[in-house]
Image: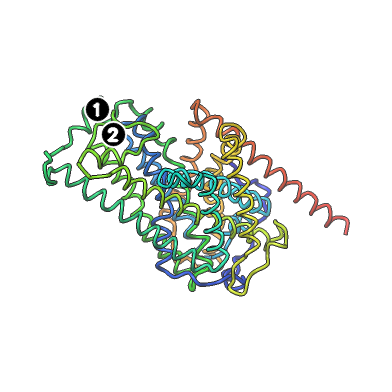
Amino acid sequence: MHDAPAAAAEPTEPQPPLAESEPLSAALKQRHLTMLGLGGVIGAGLFVGSGAGISVAGPGIVVSYLIAGALAMLVMRMLGEMSAAMPASGSFSVHAERAIGRWAGFSVGWLYWLLLVVVLAVEATAAAQIAHGWVAGVPQWAWVLIFMLFFTGANLAAVKNFGEFEFWFAALKVAAIVLFLVLGTLAIFGVLPDTEPVGLDNLVHAGGFLPNGWEGVISGVLAVVFAFGGLEVVTIAAAESDDPARSVARAVRSAVWRILFFYVGSMLVIVTVLPWTVQRAGLSPYVAVLDSIGVPSAGQIMNIVVFVALLSALNANLYGSSRMVFSLAERGEAPQGLLKVSRGGVPRRAVLASVAFGFVSVLLNLEWPDSVFKYLLNSVGAVLLFVWALIAVSQLRLRRLIERRAPERLVLRMWLFPWLTWTALAVMAAIVGLMLTDDQARPQLLWSTGATAAVMAVAGLREWRACRHRDTR
């Protein structure tokens, strides 16, 4: 992880919420942010990717999700505190710049932008694969083009379009999980027709609750922690709401516990209803459970949910990447041409720049999925940990400053400050150490470290040139 250097400039006094001086729209409502906070991290990683975690941790995956979810909750609380006090379209990039220095804001902003536009390609391709399975007459590349053009148009039109799409996408995902939890609980107690009570036997049979010991739990954490990425977008979106400070505080409060409940509750139902040994990486454990309790067409139902989750993530990533690069341009860290804003308050050039790179990523994914795109994806795979670490370091520095100079802005406070912030940083450092010892995770970490070092080198060069320019004036 990258701690702030001792020589970093003292953070400046917090300014009035940036959303007041930015030309962006303020069309997002509280209901948009609340559902974005709830649904932002509920994606294909949960519905499909969780099978990999169960296969290595067994029933202990519940503990893995508790650990990963607790870390995500702490990060979200820290980010919510800063965003409620200083709303900005660049969110944590702006906070890092104020707390640590321009190099930090530049580095985390560009790395997060790159992460979003690369992952966008994975989501567009996966959604196209599902759609192609339904309508085989339309080639996969055409589905990708349709999705990209549709969501580009929606994001170019008005920010309320993004809000409405995400509201209904999130509502469907949340409803699907709630229904799954209800059906699974009924199956456990044998309330469903033609079913016998499952009980708790599957939690202790086939090796016990921790069949692979704590090593399996830790491997489970590595398999699932990155599924919590996406919670950051709600704080980016808050800058375009009618009351940014209160909106983000409410969204974080309502989302943080419910997200943990959805994730941990789902895993508990899955490993209780079925033996963990039947789960396989790449196969949805949700489908396996629904099939076992007799839900007709369970696979197609879950395909629809995963399809919606992928489109939701695509929409959110396009939005988040465009606002991040717009914020970078505002601070002189990206081309100034990206500052062009429509009459409706939409940074259209920033949207087009983000989707253009997204199209490049999609082409790489379609043509060279196992070579060029694989390396590109690995280069951003662990960037989320760098982003989270910078959020924690920024919160440590800004919290003290806000308490001294503008305590009334602390409408949302981090729990047990600063101890839980330091705990979160320690957990992130431990995850990095574990990734270095894991044969599958190590390449991703090394490639991501290389990408981070390259961006930070550019940031350092920019700072050196700026200092040299000032000295020669």
Name the residue carrying label 2.
59
Q: How is the image coloured?
A: rainbow
Earlier in the chain: of badge 1 and badge 2, it is 2
In the drawing, does residue 87 fall left or right of residue 103? left
Vertical order, 91 against 437 (above or below): below
Label 1 to label 2: alpha-carbon separation: 8 Å
Residue 208 marker: 1
Looking at numbered disc 2 in the image, what kind of residue is underneath it? Pro
* Residue 286 visible in the picture: yes
Disc 2: CA contacts within 10 A as few (<14), some (14-19) or many (>=20):
many
Q: Do labels 1 and 2 touch, CB within 8 Å? A: yes
* Residue 227 visible in the picture: no
Q: Name the spot of residue 238 as percent of width and height, x first.
A: 50, 65
Q: Quadrant of residue 336?
A: bottom right
For the N terminus, the image quarter is: top right
- The residue shown at (71%, 43%) is 457
Looking at numbered disc 1 in the image, what kind of residue is underneath it? Gly
Q: Quadrant of residue 53?
A: top left
Residue 193 marker: none
In the drawing, does residue 57 fall left or right of residue 426? left
Q: Name the spot of residue 160 as percent of width and height, x first.
A: 49, 69
- The residue shown at (61%, 49%) is 359
For the C terminus, the image quarter is: bottom right
